[in-house]
Image (tube, rainbow, N blue to C red):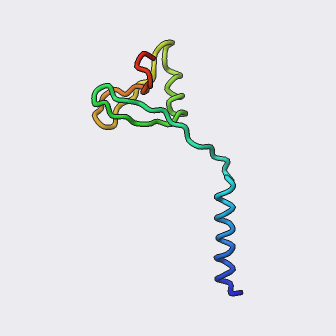
Amino acid sequence: MSSNKKQVEQQDEFLKWLEENDPLDVEEEVTISFICIKCKKEDELLDFVVDEFHYDLEEGEEVEVVCLFCGGTMRQARKDPCE
C-alpha cells in the first residue's frame, strides 16, 4: 500500500472519529432572541452573554442591548406579549 493511500485512510478514520466524539467537550450554544423596539428586527445572543448582563440589574429590570441594525434598544423577545 502506498504511503499516500495510507495517509488518506488515516485522515478519514480521524475525521470519522471527530464526527462521533467531541474532544473539547463543547456543548451546543444556546441563544436567546432579542427584538428591537424601534425597527422590530430580531437578533440572537448567546445565553452566557445575556447572563453576564444580569449582574448589574436591579430586581425587576430586564436586559437591554443596542440594536446592530438601527442603534435602538433591544429587549428579550417573548412568545406571549403579556410576559
Relative to 4, say whether 41 is above or below.
above
Residue in the image at 51% along x and 23% along y = 54
Relative to 60, say whether 21 is above or below.
below
**Is residue 76 or residue 24 the one in the foreground?**
76
Q: Residue furthest bottom?
A: 2
Quick check: 78 left or right of 19? left
Quadrant of the snapshot with the N terminus: bottom right
- Residue 64 occupies which quadrant of the picture? top left
Instruction: Give residue 28's position: percent from left, percent from top.
Output: 59, 43
Relative to 15, say whether 6 is above or below.
below
Residue in the image at 44% along x and 36% along y = 44
**Is residue 76 or residue 79 the one in the foreground?**
79
- Residue 38 occupies which quadrant of the picture? top left
Quick check: 82 left or right of 73? right
Quadrant of the snapshot with the C terminus: top left
Instruction: Give residue 70's position: percent from left, percent from top.
Output: 28, 34
Instruction: Give residue 76's position: percent from left, percent from top.
Output: 43, 26
